[in-house]
Image: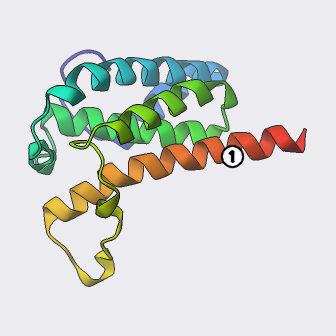
Amino acid sequence: MDKPATFYDGEKLIKLLVAASGKDSGPQLDARLQQDVIFWKAVGPTLNPDWSGQLITVGDPLFMKFNETKLIVQELTRERYAPANPTVVELRNFWVSQPQLYDAKWGDHDFSRGGSVLQMIRGELYELVKDCDEFTKQVRVENNAR
């Protein structure tokens, strides 16, 4: 995952990582997400306000990194890997602190009636925070059930 991609199917890549990790996939995914948080903290503040237009191109490195980050959070949720909670919370808190990464208005668009590609991409940027919130809610519920 650290080498330049020769193909990119983010879902397939995450499935390969999970399969290769076996029962250790939770810690491996968390470690990868920690690397992604470091990346976004370094790169996020340097992005200009219209950077999200780069996410239109599937092979673009920012598209690939964003897609990876989002898919890892979703997989951690599926696996219910609670020890990743600090990493997910750190990602979420950083993401919402950066106006070029997150604007609450981006979640207001109803895509069932269509929308531009850029609106849909901004919707995905907004959805990352919702994915993080879903993960932390799941961890809270499971901790309260114990």
Picture coordinates of residue 46, whole percent (x, y): 14, 26
Please tell me whether mark 1 sits on a helix, a strand or a loop.
helix
What kind of residue is marked 1? Gln
x and y percentages locating residue 131 in the rendered image:
49, 48
Residue beneath label 1, please? Answer: 138
Residue at the image position 21 percent from the left and 28 percent from the top: 45
Image check: 144 left or right of 22?
right
Q: Could you say which quadrant of the image residue 40 lies in? A: top left
- Residue 36, compared with residue 123, is above or below; it is above
| 3 with respect to 127 (left or right) | left
Q: Which image quadrant is residue 122 in?
A: bottom left
Judge by depth and name the residue closer to the eye, 59 or 126.
Answer: 126
Quadrant in which the N terminus appears: top left
Image location (x, y in percent) of residue 58: 16, 45
Please provide percent x and percent y for residue 38.
35, 18
Chosen colour scheme:
rainbow
Q: Report the residue at 53% width, 32% height from top.
A: 89
Give the position of the C terminus as an image quadrant.
top right
What residue appears at the point 44 percent right and 31 percent down from the top-left corner?
91
Could you say which is closer to the camera, residue 90 or residue 20?
Answer: 90
Judged left or right of residue 86, residue 9 is left
State whether residue 27 appears in this view.
Answer: yes
Q: How dense is the environment of label 1, judged by Cα within 10 Å: few (below 14), some, or many (20 and up)? A: some
Q: Which of 72 and 101 is in front in this view?
A: 101
Whether residue 71 sits left or right of residue 145 in the image: it is left
Q: From the viewer's perspective, is residue 113 above or below residue 3?
A: below
Q: Relative to 32, is 134 above or below?
A: below
Q: Which residue is drawn at 61% across and 30% down?
A: 85
* Marker count (numbered): 1
Report the residue that reaches farthest toward the bottom: 113
